Image (cartoon, helix red, strand yellow):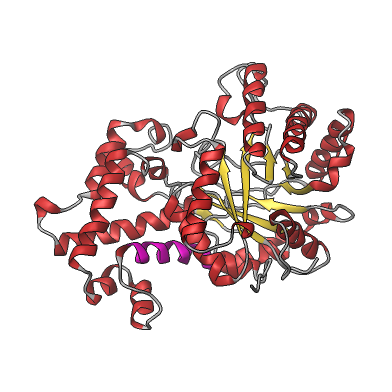
Amino acid sequence: MSPTSHAPVVDRLADTIARHRLGQPVGVYSVCSAHPTVVQAAIDQAAADGGYVLIEATSNQVDQFGGYTGLRPADFRDLVHRIADERGFPRDRVVLGGDHLGPNRWQGESSNAAMQKAEVLIAAYVEAGYRKIHLDCSMSCADDPDVLPDEIVASRSARLLRVAEDSARRVETAPVYVIGTEVPVPGGAHETLGQLVPTPADRARTTIAAHRTAFAELGLESVWPRVIALVVQPGVEFDHQQVIDYDRTATAELRRVLDGEGLVFEAHSTDYQRPERLRELVEDHWAILKVGPGLTFAMREALFALAMIENELVETALRSHLVDVVERRMLAEPGYWEGYYTGDALAQRVARRYSYSDRLRYYWADPEVEAARKTLLDNLDRVGIPLPLISQFLPDQYHRVRAGELTPTPQTLVLDRVRDALRPYAHACRSTGEVHD
């Protein structure tokens, strides 16, 4: 099927994967963020590129109970579609996915209890129209050993696959699936990283074989052609203060695992990789690049820059005090960061605000933080932003404003800063699923 045809959404994604398997160095980036501003920026980038957008909710963000965003799968679907409608972006160019779907949210419970909730989670995603499903049963539950053998991971994945397929028949869809046990921790490493070793090739082959066997044991062999990707560790990661860049010389043997398989690799935690490394990942068969915290990191950079501009233009009593509000709420509700950021009080404060792992992203939905964000944007809309201040605090956006490519309104500046984090992905994946309407 031609990538320029008016194909159903999954066919656009499947077409990208098929073209890659035929030798074209193309891929797709997956936006793993539930923040509306990031969703808007992703849709704007896809519109500018003439392609489709792949947006995924993780099991931390969105589940049957609301996740940390307060959104259930159908709620997030409606949010994305509403934003697409508002921006004139066709819904048939939006692919929704579910990331790390499995017992991840309930690791403190018994495996039986956690898997029962995971079944409900999978059904909710599929029935809400999510078409790319990552079956992730790699984490241990309360009554499990610290490291699960591939056979248990695969059997649990097959159990969830059966639920997904039963749900798909009810809503007359055919999801595509991602498997894999070499899954980085959602949102980046918890600890300071040293050297990172890519997944050994024999381990990747074992993962594929275990899942094939487990699917067959449940009579699901016919689903295998819709398994499009395997998650493996290419040797990329980030922690609070550093990024480990991709080294293609370390993955030569791993890449050969795909010989004779109808799969591509999916790379998690690609945030902050240099543009040339993203391109190398795509060329080396990591045809799906996941990015999440790097996008809210860019959004935070823009909002904090606007807060500095606000300090120059707005009297103290009327300011949003966004940075102070964020800090106060993070200290009042430390559950999302205190187990991650170590060191003295100064080190923790710097990490709360600026770390690559961006634990701050969990606080944007806080009512006080959201109110401060809105006040900030309203204040700057009201007073206007002089060009020299844009130059001082958002220099890349300043150049686009001066070139007539960007309007100097606060929300537009924020969106463009997020797109700066997306543009290297668009370039790396290049010509993915072009649409010419």
Q: How many marks?
A: 0
Q: Closest to the observer: 123 or 368?
A: 123
The magenta span reads 411-424
Quarter of the image that includes the N terminus: bottom right
Q: Position of residue 301 (x, y in %)?
A: 35, 58
Q: Residue at x 62, y 23 (%)?
A: 117
Q: Position of residue 379 (x, y in %)?
A: 20, 59
- Give the vertical position of 307 relative to 171 (above or below): below
Q: Position of residue 267 (x, y in %)?
A: 65, 52
* Residue 309 in view (yes/no): no
State the predominant SS element of the stretch in magenta. Answer: helix
Q: 115 left or right of 56?
A: right
Q: Residue at x 39, y 36 (%)?
A: 337
Q: Quadrant of residue 208?
A: top right
Q: Residue at x 38, y 75 (%)?
A: 406
- Give the vertical position of 72 relative to 265 (above or below): above
Q: Closest to the observer: 401 or 279?
A: 401
Q: Residue at x 78, y 44 (%)?
A: 204
Q: Position of residue 348 (x, y in %)?
A: 33, 40
> Is residue 31 inside the magenta stretch?
no
Q: Closest to the observer: 147 or 330?
A: 330
